């Protein structure tokens, strides 16, 4: 009956215990390696800073699970794709605003008149009736020379190019 029970000394010297111990060490080493790989990929997606990337990897490499906890507390909240998308959306929103040439107020691009001073943003072409900005000398839709719709029905204003004698630059003159 004495041989049926194992003592703690017999268990620690058994092959099963050494195999279990080696398996546990290999598992922990693979887990640690996987943590380093995950942190490397995660920080590359969250920061362009080489210093922060190296520091984060070394933190997990040196402190293992404690380094991972510290990394998770201090890593950037957004990844680079989300940050770029947010910046792009903000740029698109800012581009959708138009600055009034008269009062310098900003309003939505889709409005035809400034809601602050009433100035018309776009003038329709007299040939094709499509709207384009006042700055064009030719209509971008039909290619005709830009004629601005008159404010009074009996006047017709046409933009003509004129070369300045002083500067030699082309400019526009209403005739």
Image: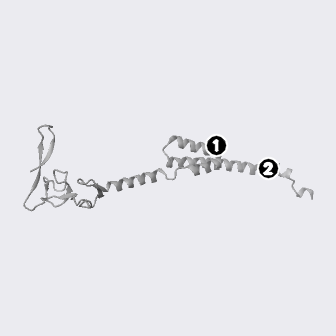
Could you tell whether 96 is left or right of 22 in the image? left
For mark 1, give the secondary structure: helix
| Picture residue at 47% right of the left edge, 50% below the top | 80
Q: Distance between the residues labelled 1 and 2?
A: 32 Å
Q: Which corner quadrant holds the N terminus?
A: bottom right
x and y percentages locating residue 90 in the rendered image: 38, 54
- The residue to which callout 1 is attached is 62
x and y percentages locating residue 123 in the rendered image: 18, 58
Q: Which of 106 and 33 is in front in this view?
A: 106
Could you tell whether 118 is left or right of 38 in the image? left
x and y percentages locating residue 156 in the rendered image: 9, 57
For mark 2, give the secondary structure: helix
- The residue to which callout 2 is attached is 15
Which label lies toward us, 1 or 2?
Answer: 1
x and y percentages locating residue 149 in the rendered image: 13, 59
Count of numbered badges drawn on the protein: 2
Q: Local crowd at mark 1 within 10 Å, few (<14), some, or many (≥20)?
A: few
| Picture residue at 10% right of the left edge, 55% below the top | 157
| Picture residue at 62% right of the left edge, 44% below the top | 61
Give whichever of discs 1 and 2 has the lower sequence position.
2
């Amino acid at each position: 009956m004495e041989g049926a029970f194992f003592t703690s000394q017999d268990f620690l010297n058994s092959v099963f215990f050494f195999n279990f111990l080696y398996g546990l060490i290999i598992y922990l080493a693979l887990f640690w390696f996987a943590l380093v790989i995950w942190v490397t990929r995660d920080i590359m997606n969250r920061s362009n800073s080489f210093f922060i990337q190296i520091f984060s990897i070394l933190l997990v490499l040196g402190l293992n699970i404690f380094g991972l906890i510290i990394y998770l507390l201090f890593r950037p909240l957004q990844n680079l794709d989300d940050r770029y998308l947010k910046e792009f959306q903000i740029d698109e929103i800012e581009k959708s605003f138009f600055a009034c040439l008269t009062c310098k107020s900003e309003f939505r691009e889709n409005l035809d008149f400034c809601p602050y001073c009433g100035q018309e943003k776009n003038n329709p072409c007299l040939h094709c009736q499509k709207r384009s900005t006042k700055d064009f000398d030719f209509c971008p839709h039909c290619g005709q020379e830009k004629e601005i719709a008159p404010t009074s029905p009996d006047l017709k204003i046409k933009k003509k190019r004129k070369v300045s004698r002083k500067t030699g630059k082309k400019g526009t003159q209403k005739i």
